[in-house]
């Protein structure tokens, strides 16, 4: 499996729900940590950064809304999704006021949860890319031939760079034409190995 899509904290005391949601998200490429109580969740949030926190509303001790409220104080950029078997207008409205991305009554479709997570993580990556203006410089990669006839949109290596670094520079049609005219043994991948970020002021 390639790079993980993002790191998720799943806070759920019900083992069946916790394990099924965890397995589904992991199968879909996410790195998932689990906590069974609000207190355990807050300890994990203190020590690590998570792209999104998925919280059950009713937890032993501190409830999900309180966990998210405290998490925002610890890490202001925290994003969260509430799941609950006991939905109410009051808790839904409070979840919205706290800035939770979604409020999903149980039973819910895991696809709906994954879409919310995916959209949230893409927003974070998009903001980071805009702020830092990072990209990969172009150049020949020694001993790495092009295997897609310079159709970079269909190349897994190019997609991997896109996923990891947000944006990649694009070579012009004239350059592509020139590369395609080279002997097969000299048709090297146009993306140089990652040497670091480059940014503009």
Image (spheres, helix red, strand yellow):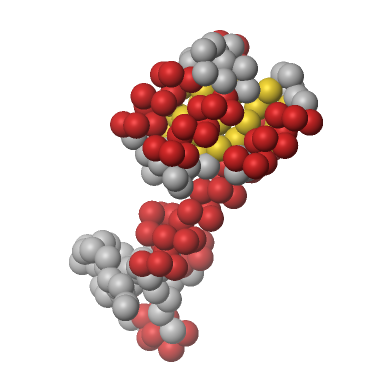
Query: Going by the image, does 23 lie left or right of 179?
Result: right
Q: Position of residue 61 (x, y in %)?
A: 51, 13
| Residue at x 54%, y 27% (from the top left corner) | 66
Near-viewer residue (122 or 93): 93
Near-viewer residue (99 or 148): 99
Residue 19 visible in rendering: no
Where is 163 relative to 116, above or below? below
| Residue at x 28%, y 71% (from the top left corner) | 198
Where is 44 relative to 74, above or below? above
Q: Position of residue 112 (x, y in %)?
A: 69, 37
Where is 180 relative to 12, above or below? below
**Residue at the extreme right:** 89
**Residue at the extreme bottom:** 174
Q: Position of residue 113 (x, y in %)?
A: 64, 35
Query: Going by the image, does 101 lie left or right of 34?
Result: right
Q: Position of residue 157 (x, y in %)?
A: 39, 57
| Residue at x 57%, y 20% (from the top left corner) | 63
Q: How many marks?
A: 0
Near-viewer residue (22 or 82): 82
Quarter of the picture holding the C terminus:
bottom left
Residue 48 visible in rendering: yes
| Residue at x 39%, y 37% (from the top left corner) | 74
Quarter of the picture holding the N terminus:
top left
């Amino acid at each position: 499996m390639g790079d993980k899509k993002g790191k998720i904290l799943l806070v759920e005391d019900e083992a069946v729900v916790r394990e099924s949601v965890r397995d589904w998200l992991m199968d879909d490429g996410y790195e998932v940590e689990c906590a069974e109580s609000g207190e355990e969740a807050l300890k994990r949030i203190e020590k690590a950064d998570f792209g999104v926190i998925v919280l059950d509303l009713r937890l032993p001790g501190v409830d999900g809304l309180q966990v998210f409220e405290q998490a925002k104080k610890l890490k202001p950029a925290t994003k969260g999704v509430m799941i609950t078997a006991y939905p109410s207008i009051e808790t839904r409205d409070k979840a919205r006021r706290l800035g939770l991305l979604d409020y999903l009554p149980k039973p819910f479709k895991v696809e709906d949860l994954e879409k919310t997570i995916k959209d949230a993580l893409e927003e974070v990556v998009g903001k980071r890319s805009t702020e830092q203006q990072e990209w990969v410089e172009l150049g020949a990669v020694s001993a790495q031939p092009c295997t897609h006839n310079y159709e970079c949109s269909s190349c897994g290596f190019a997609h991997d760079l896109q996923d990891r670094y947000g944006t990649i520079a694009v070579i012009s049609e004239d350059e592509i034409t020139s590369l395609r005219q080279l002997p097969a043994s000299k048709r090297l991948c146009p993306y140089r190995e990652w040497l670091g970020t480059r940014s503009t002021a």
